[in-house]
Image: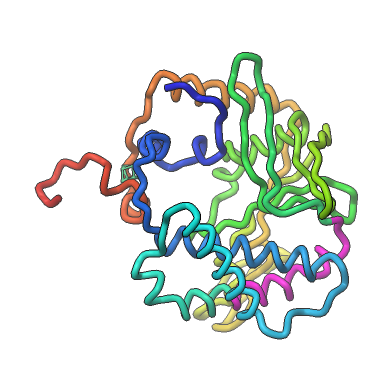
Amino acid sequence: MKIKEIHSSDLTASCMKFVQLRLQGKLRPAATTALFRGLVVGEALRYLHERVLHNGSEEPALYTLLVNEAVATVRKTLTDEGRTPTDAVETNMNEIVSDIGMFMENYYRRFKERFAASQFLGCEVPVRWKFAPRMPEFASHIDLLIRDRNGMLVFIDWKLREQAPTHAYLSRNLQFASYYGCCLEGKFLLSDGLSSEWKRFGEESIGVWLHVNHLAPFGRKTKCEDDRGMEREFVKGDDRPTRMSWREVEYHSNSIEMIRGQLMERVRLLKRDIFPSNPDPVGCTLCEAESFCPRFDTVL
Ligand code: SF4
């Protein structure tokens, strides 16, 4: 398969068969609930950052208004792409809007001071990295890019997955490692609102996996470590410790060679049309390519 550029989603998909089907355009046009929620959260958090969190503006009076605006934008984008939300999305729209409103409110309350002290560099920032000669460029979009109060470059990815990552998983996540490589050697399309230009940082950075579902309070009595590392009991309605939603990864600068090597290995597999299927009990149910993917049972 000829590959002009390599996207982060091609590297980190839980199933490479899905990547092959997606590259062949074999995705159903309906936008699933998981996809729709992810798009709305991204859009709504972008509004919160651009309009409120970095310029001392007042907290939004009604988060549902922001979320409804995000829903309208996402609907338009999907329509432009010839896609429509599934019936399940339409049936559960009120619940989706109210859930995301709750996440936004908690996001603002938990992180407003952290963000107020940081410099906002952009949301959905296009990024490119030519990581080796004769290899396609790495291309992606970073959910949020800031410079923190200590001057450190920080890239943040808003994740809506059910399962929170272990540190062992995070420290090996190739999407995050590639973003670190981009901060050192790649370029970012930054906008000042009037014009945009590609900029290179050439800097060390920190990655943050922001686990959005853990912005919801505990749903029942739970015993776990708080943010000071002390074991304590939380009751229903208590905030979860910040460390459960704000998951930082720091990188060793020696790892850049290894990151380049891993990227080259993935590209070599894709170029040779090696796309092993990797069925997953949850992933296959949610997979947009499921109806195109071969199966062995008698129920079609
Ligand atoms: S249905 Fe499952 S095995 Fe098939 S492409 Fe999707 S995730 Fe992979």
Q: Where is residue 203 in the image (x, y as percent from the top left)?
A: 83, 35
> Which residue: 72% across, 68% down?
48
State the residue in front, 178 or 66. 66
Q: Looking at the picture, does residue 124 appear above or below residue 228?
A: above
> Which residue: 83% across, 32% down?
202
Q: Where is residue 293 in the image (x, y as percent from the top left)?
A: 27, 41
Q: Position of residue 199 (x, y in %)?
A: 82, 36
Instruction: Evaluate whether residue 287 shows in this view.
Output: no
For the stretch drawn in magenta, what is the main secondary structure? helix
Describe residue 275's horizontal placement relative to residue 294 as left or right: right
Magenta residue span: 101-119
Q: Looking at the picture, does residue 151 appear above or below residue 117?
A: above
* Residue that lies at the very extreme toward the left in this rendered image: 298
**Residue 106 drawn in magenta:** yes
Q: In which quarter of the image is the N terminus?
A: top left
Instruction: Evaluate whether residue 213 shows in this view.
Output: yes
> Which residue: 84% across, 65% down?
54
Q: Looking at the picture, does residue 230 appear above or below residue 126?
A: below
